[in-house]
Structure formats: structure tokens, C-alpha cells
Image (cartoon, helix red, strand yellow):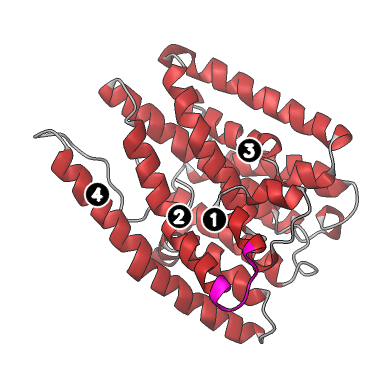
Amino acid sequence: MKRILALDGMRTVAIAMVVAYHIDNTLVPAGHWGVHLFLVLSGFVITGSLCAEIDRTGRLDLGAFYRKRLLRIVPALAVVCLALLVVGTAWSQVQSSIGLYANYARIEGVSLGKLTHTWFIAVIAQFYLVWPLAMSAIPARRRALVIGGLAVVAIVWRVVAIEVMSPGWVYNATDTNAAGLFVGSFLAVAGLRATRATVAWSVPALLGLMLLPVFGNSGDLVLWGGFVALALSALALLYASTDPAWLQSQILLRIAEVSFGIYLWHYVFVRSEIPLWVAVVCTALATAASWWLIERPLVRWDARRRARRSEPGRVLLTTTTPPLVE
């Protein structure tokens, strides 16, 4: 699959929204919309990658897929969990995070403390577990129809769930967050195109509306506003697909490269009783250590391992900047 660098830049926009929300949710009441943007991007990237592999080889190497995602997520997450255990965090707050079911633990009322944000990692991991199996069963000619249908069903279910399920379920559960994942997946297979002028307004709108308290932490529009975020995120992805130059700046790309570490560590320090500037410095240092000592070496090791096992002449699609949620 052709790599769209602007999607990396858009991932930086998403992580900035989430971090800003965690720092001060009165200043950025709907910064949690960054999660919806992450979900759409995740669905798009992972589905495009799966389709590319199926079309190129006729099958999915599920073992390689799961190994790659486990190496991308679990070691760095485990280090965060271990660090918190060392400083006295209870195992009851850690086990669901490392077990990748923090979203449902949160729904059940388990206090995750400084690991509360790992509910999103659990959603992505659960999607990774199921979606390749489903994709391998969808005929290539039916992808747009089937995935489009799944997106419609997921959106309708989220509407119904807002009325019949608890707010915690709607916000945290994988089935209700599947709407964003399937919308992104549909965009990956539908071949939709847009001119830059028609969708360029989507990013300013997303960033502007997230500042409105009406979409913030309380009130009916917290959950219903998610559909606004979902629509704008889909348009923002189409905008990124037009390769705008500003989303390909080296600063945004480098931040995107280490975005998983930022996501893992920022909440730990922002939720600590330390000055904000100290939290920012600690996040930067921990993120750098995570990338250089854990994430990057594992990515390179896996790439070398796959290269050694590949057939002669086979071209491997590798990346130097693996996404948070590829």
C-alpha cells in the first residue's frame, strides 16, 4: 500500500488533541475527539495494509500480523505498567491494562488510575485480534459493500447504544467505537477521492469545535457529539489523502513516529502531582527512551527477521515510522 505521509501528520494532530484534553479539559473540552480521529486513521491504515497483502500474495500471514502488532504494543506498554508497579501502583490497576481489556474493566468501574488512558489501546488491540480474520473471509470484489455495510451497522448500533447502554459503555466499549474503525476501513476500500478545496475546512472545524464546552465532559452532546467528530475525522482523512504539504513537515512526522510513547507516558506524568513543565519534560524523556530502547530496536529486529525468512526477490513493505495504531 502506498504510504501517505500526511496521515502521519494527521496522527500528530490527533495526539495533540488528546494530550491537550488530558492537560486541561476546561480549555479543550472536546479534545477527546482526537480518539475518533485515531480510530478512523487506524481503520484506514490497517485495512489498507491487509488488502495490500491479500492482493499481493493471495493470503494473510496471520502469524506475522499478530507478532508485529504485539511487538509494537505490548513491550512498551509493559514497561509503563512495570514502572508504575515499582512506585506502588496496585496490581488491580495494572492487570487489565497489560491484559488489553482496560476498556471493559473501566466500564465495570475498576479504577485504573494513571493507566486510565489504556482503555483506547485495548480497543485497538481487540480490533487487531478480530479484523484480520474477518478480512481474510471477505471476497475482494465485495469489500466496499461488506465493509460499508459494517460501518452503517456500527453507526446505527452506536446511536441505539446511546439510548440503551450506559455512557461508560458507549465511550469505552469496542463495539461502540467500531463505528470509527469501520468508517476508516470503508474509506480504505471505497476509493473515494476529494479535492483539497472541498475538504480543507475539516481540520479547522475539528480543532475549532473541540473548544466548545457543549461537546465537553458533561451533557447530552458528549456522546452525540462523537458523530460530529466521526464525520469531521473522515473528511480530515480525505483531506490528508490529498497530500497537503503542512501535514508532511518533518516536525509533525517525527512526533508521529514517537506518538505511541507520547500516548503511553504523558498521562502518567500529567496525572502526577508535579508542575506541568516537569510533566512535559518527563514525558519527552520517557518517550525518547521508549522509542530508542524498546520500540525502534524491536521494529528493526522484526524487519530483519522477516527479511531473512522471505523468499528471494520478494519485496517487503517496511516503514521507518510505524504508526501508533497500524
Residue 54 image position (x, y, % from top left): 34, 24
Q: Are marks 4 and 3 in contact (CB under 8 Å)?
A: no
Residue 286 vs residue 39: left or right?
left
Q: Nearer the viewer, mark 4 or mark 3?
A: 4
Q: Which residues are magenta?
A: 84-91
Spatial distance from mark 3 to mark 2, Cα to Cα? 23 Å
Q: Which residue is mark 1?
A: 98
User: Which mark is first along the chain, 3 or 4?
Assistant: 3
User: Which mark is first along the chain, 2 or 3?
Assistant: 2
Are there few (<14), some (14-19), or many (20+) residues within 10 Å of tag 2? some
**Where does the N terminus fall, quadrant-wise?**
top left
* Residue at left offset 37%, top offset 38%: 65
Is residue 85 part of the magenta span, yes or no? yes
Q: Amino acid at mark 4?
A: Ala
* Residue at left offset 69%, top offset 23%: 153
Residue 30 image position (x, y, % from top left): 75, 57
Helix, strand or loop at label 3? It is helix
User: Which mark is first along the chain, 1 or 2?
Assistant: 2
Spatial distance from mark 4 to mark 3, Cα to Cα? 29 Å
Are there few (<14), some (14-19), or many (20+) residues within 10 Å of tag 4? some
Q: Is residue 188 visible?
A: no
Residue 180's mark? 3
* Residue at left offset 26%, top offset 56%: 300
User: Which mark is first along the chain, 4 or 1?
Assistant: 1
Q: Which residue is mark 2?
A: 74
Q: Which residue is mark 4?
A: 303
